[in-house]
Image (tube, grey):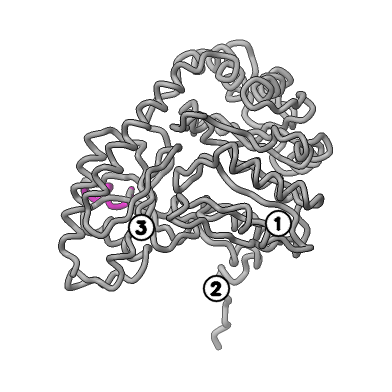
Amino acid sequence: MAIAVESPASMLADRINALEESSTLAMTKMARELAAKGHKVISLSVGEPDFKTPAHICDAAKKAIDDGFHGYSPVAGYPDLRKAIADKFNRDNNLPWKPENVVVSTGAKHSLANVLQVLVNPGDEVVIFSPYWVSYSEMVKLAEGVSVVIDGTFENDFKVTPEQFEAAITDRTKVVMYASPNNPTGSVYSEAELRAIGEVVARHENVYVLADEIYEYINFTPEGHFSIGSIPEIAERVITVNGVAKGYAMTGWRIGYIGAAKWIADGVEKLQGQVTSGTNSIAQKATVAALNGSLDASREMAKAYHRRRDLVVGLLKEIPGFKVNTPEGAFYAFPDVSAYYGKSDGTTVINNSDDFSNWLLNTCYVATVAGSGFGAPNCIRISTAAADEALVEAVQRIRDAVATLA
């Protein structure tokens, strides 16, 4: 008599079975598989700079190896790195944090997850400005919180208004989280807009702000970056998250950090001490050099992203049916492609952004990411972190492909 055996997946914890796979990583994986089969794939799915880490940062890492930084690092980060981060917060963001307010983690994603685990109790509500980075809602889910998603409209450059935010607040609201510059839209909240949002926060004394500023240095606005944590009335309730991946082309180095009230920083350090402990010792020493060194390389990268933004947005606007805004930061375009929903190439019917993105990958071998994972089902995300020639060819392939839809 055969014995029934449960599938391995059914033995996983409920929290894992409930978790969605990262749509950006899933698309990147599919693109790599097609490329391995010999197809000439242009991958515009992953949010990764195509520049090399600046030489002075690499040199600092080599020196750290030679100097013997081979052991476990302090849970919250090396003292010199925490000081460099505190100095950066003071210098660039008008955030008067001290080293004791800083915790270094294994990437900004780790920092965000840490904060949610530390602040959110089961059933607490986390307001998320949408479109949002794909992991936000899943992180809230892991913290047993409830995501309350507010949609920023295309007409308002995908930005949420203070009125929308206030209407979403209930007696269960614990955290509001957003990114500026934004992934996936590239939208940037101005100082005036963030001050207005700050006024809402000030009226609700139990609401905390989780501000994701990882794209800080890739900002094309004349006024530049503004940190909501610099507003004195709410400063103690703002947790600022940043890192070196985007602005310094250091994605693989895996360094993120927070600046927060000491009791929050202490909570994050306590959690991290039981999960990962201190992050990579050599990468930390490289980050000291990054934060204390010149921003010339970062500024040159930002100029290149600005030029590519103009190039790609201009080309996308020439595609019939595409609605395209002009991103003010980061390195993405986020066109509304819903005009093609319900259309077919004779074999495949495009019903949604997942269909559209998958169809592009399998038809013209251009990897994008469906907007559904970002809370924007009418859009697709296109990374502009690629060479100009690849971007031009990719958009031409997309234009030729959609011309077959009717």
Left or right: 141, with 43 as reference point: right
The picture places residue 346, in percent across and down from the top left corner, at 17, 73
The picture places residue 137, in percent across and down from the top left corner, at 59, 57
Where the C terminus falls, by quadrant?
Answer: bottom left
| Labels 2 & 3 near each other (Cβ < 8 A) | no
Where the N terminus falls, by quadrant?
Answer: bottom right
The answer to whether residue 212 is visible is: yes
Q: Nearer the viewer, mark 2 or mark 1?
A: 1
Which dot marks residue 97?
none
Name the N-terminal-most of marks 2 and 3.
2
Query: Which span of residues is magenta-colored?
Result: 32-39
Q: Which residue is mark 2?
A: 7
Residue 74 figure quarter: top right
Which dot marks residue 336?
3
Q: Nearer the viewer, mark 1 or mark 3?
A: 3
Q: What amino acid is found at the position of numbered circle 2 in the picture?
A: Ser
How many marks are shown on the rendered structure? 3
Q: Residue at x 84, y 38 (%)?
A: 263
As for residue 224 lying within the magenta part, the answer is no
Which dot marks residue 143?
1
| Labels 1 & 3 near each other (Cβ < 8 A) | no
Q: Secondary structure at mark 3?
A: loop
